[in-house]
Image (cartoon, rainbow, N blue to C red):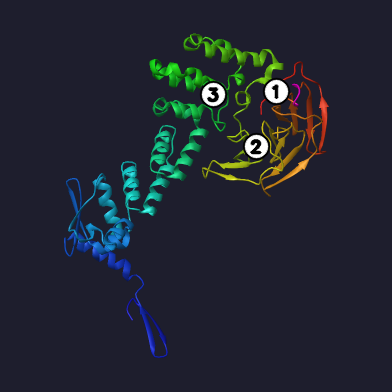
């Protein structure tokens, strides 16, 4: 029977050669290269590419629509393509015959643009994956801008996440210095920035301003208002921020610095400060995954949302939501379990505590703290969770509580000398 397949049913025989279509495309590609039986020429600029309408229609959705819907071009021998890279178009015509295209750093953007125009979604997805796998602090901003222009949502989200996770390295790149004003404002206000200290965000913002001081110094008050200056160390505020000549020359900027210094010097004023400027930019890591818990939405409502980021796979996904909405929540990790402590639910400060088990994707409520608290310092020492200070809705607290996961009990320890919020690291 040769290389075919034969199935006999009584007097009926079905004979098949399963690789015939693939072999047929190989032959048609050879015929095309010989310039035989071609019935259409695709022209872009000074370049012309001969092809077979039936192959283009069968493999490329754009040409399928053109040749099967009585468009003017369906009867033309030569079709003009505007604004497309010739080498990318040639590669995709070859792809129509072979099912293969080579993607590299030099052609990936041109191929993505051309495949998007020709509605070759599989090639477009392959180009997006190529760019996503090669994100780097020096290119992620350019990739993000390109992805937004091409409406590649997944690639845009990946580049954005990479930017947040590698903010300090990205801020040292030339691309960062060329960002538009609205992009920098959005970035320095972002809760998801992965920084060890707020001082790093300040330095990045100031480097951007100094890159074009004549134009950008007028934006400094608005930019500085997005920096969480109260979270900077007092010495940094005095020795670095306050001494910056562009800040010293701006009354609004000096007011923001004074507000930050008051945060440290006059703790009783802390509850009256804008909450976003005293909110930590922090996530919590469990088994190599990063968790973002609670917070506020754009309307200022407290959230019960929990999300997890996989740094290896470079994606975020939702977890089971918390039982209670919490903003300004304390977060701690003990023995692979994630604790959400206190916070604010939009109506009152909370004393309740719930714990998340990543293996079962479940939240369970445990013993409540002795005091209601939001915006407190939270730290783990020797397997115990300590919460310090915070705000109970009426006044700042100076008490310290300790939780033992083994006994599920809270105990009060020595109080701090002064009341306040966020005195300890998250």
Relative side of 264 to 71, left or right: right
Q: Secondary structure at mark 1?
A: loop
- State how far apart marks 1 and 2 are (Cα): 18 Å
Q: Residues within 10 Å of mark 1 (few under 14, many from 20)?
A: many
Q: Earlier in the sequence, mark 1 or mark 3?
A: 3
Relative side of 32 to 396, left or right: left
Q: Which mark is residue 300?
A: none
Q: Are marks 1 and 3 in contact (CB under 8 Å)?
A: no
Q: Which residues are magenta?
A: 392-396
Q: Which residue appears at 40% of the width and 38% of the height? A: 143
- State how far apart marks 3 and 2 are (Cα): 20 Å
| Residue named by callout 1 | 421
Q: Which residue appears at 77% of the width and 16% of the height? A: 417
Q: Residues within 10 Å of mark 3 (few under 14, many from 20)?
A: many
Expressed as whole percent of the image width and height from the top left, the position of residue 227 reads 55, 22
- State how far apart marks 1 and 3 are (Cα): 19 Å
Residue in the foreground of this view, choosing between 43 and 387: 43
Q: Quadrant of the N terminus?
A: bottom left
| In magenta segment, residue 426 | no
Above or below residue 320? Residue 299 is: above
Q: Which mark is residue 226?
A: 3
Q: In the picture, residue 364 is in which quadrant?
A: top right
Expressed as whole percent of the image width and height from the top left, the position of residue 279 reads 63, 27
Q: Quadrant of the C terminus?
A: top right
Above or below residue 169? Residue 14 is: below
Q: Which mark is residue 294?
A: 2
Magenta span dominant secondary structure: loop
Q: Secondary structure at mark 3?
A: helix
Residue in the foreground of this view, choosing between 379 and 396: 396
Q: Secondary structure at mark 2?
A: loop
């Amino acid at each position: 029977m040769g290389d075919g397949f034969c199935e006999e049913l009584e007097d009926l025989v079905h004979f098949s050669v399963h690789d015939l279509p693939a072999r047929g495309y190989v032959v048609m590609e050879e015929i095309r290269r010989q310039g035989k039986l071609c019935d259409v020429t695709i022209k872009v600029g000074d370049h012309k590419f001969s092809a077979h309408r039936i192959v283009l229609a069968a493999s490329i959705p754009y040409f399928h629509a053109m040749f099967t819907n009585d468009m003017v071009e369906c009867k033309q021998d030569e079709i003009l393509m505007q604004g497309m890279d010739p080498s990318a178009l040639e590669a995709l015509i070859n792809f129509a015959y072979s099912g293969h295209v080579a993607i590299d750093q030099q052609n990936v953007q041109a191929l993505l643009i051309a495949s998007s125009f020709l509605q070759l979604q599989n090639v477009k997805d392959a180009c997006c994956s190529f760019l996503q796998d090669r994100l780097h602090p020096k290119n992620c901003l350019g990739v993000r801008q390109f992805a937004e222009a091409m409406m590649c949502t997944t690639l845009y989200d990946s580049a954005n996440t990479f930017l947040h996770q590698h903010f300090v390295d990205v801020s040292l790149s030339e691309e960062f210095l060329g960002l538009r004003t609205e992009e920098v404002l959005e970035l320095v206000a972002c809760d998801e920035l992965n920084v060890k200290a707020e001082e790093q965000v300040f330095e990045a913002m100031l480097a951007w301003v100094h890159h074009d001081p004549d134009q950008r110094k007028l934006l400094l008050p608005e930019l500085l208002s997005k920096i969480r200056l109260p979270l900077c160390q007092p010495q940094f505020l005095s020795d670095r921020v306050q001494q910056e000549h562009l800040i010293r020359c701006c009354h609004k900027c000096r007011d923001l610095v004074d507000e930050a210094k008051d945060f440290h010097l006059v703790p009783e004023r802390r509850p009256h400060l804008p909450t976003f400027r005293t909110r930590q930019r922090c996530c919590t890591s469990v088994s190599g995954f990063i968790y973002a818990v609670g917070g506020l939405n754009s309307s200022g409502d407290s959230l019960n949302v929990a999300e997890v980021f996989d740094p290896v796979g470079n994606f975020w996904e939702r977890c089971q939501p918390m039982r209670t909405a919490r903003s300004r929540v304390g977060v701690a990790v003990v023995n692979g379990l994630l604790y959400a402590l206190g916070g604010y639910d939009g109506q009152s400060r909370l004393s309740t505590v719930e714990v998340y088990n990543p293996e079962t994707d479940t939240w369970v409520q445990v013993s409540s703290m002795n005091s209601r608290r939001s915006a407190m310092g939270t730290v783990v020492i020797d397997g115990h969770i300590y919460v310090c200070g915070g705000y109970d809705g009426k006044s700042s607290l100076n008490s310290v509580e300790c939780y033992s996961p083994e006994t599920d009990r809270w105990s009060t320890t020595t109080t701090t000398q002064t009341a306040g919020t966020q005195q300890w690291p998250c």
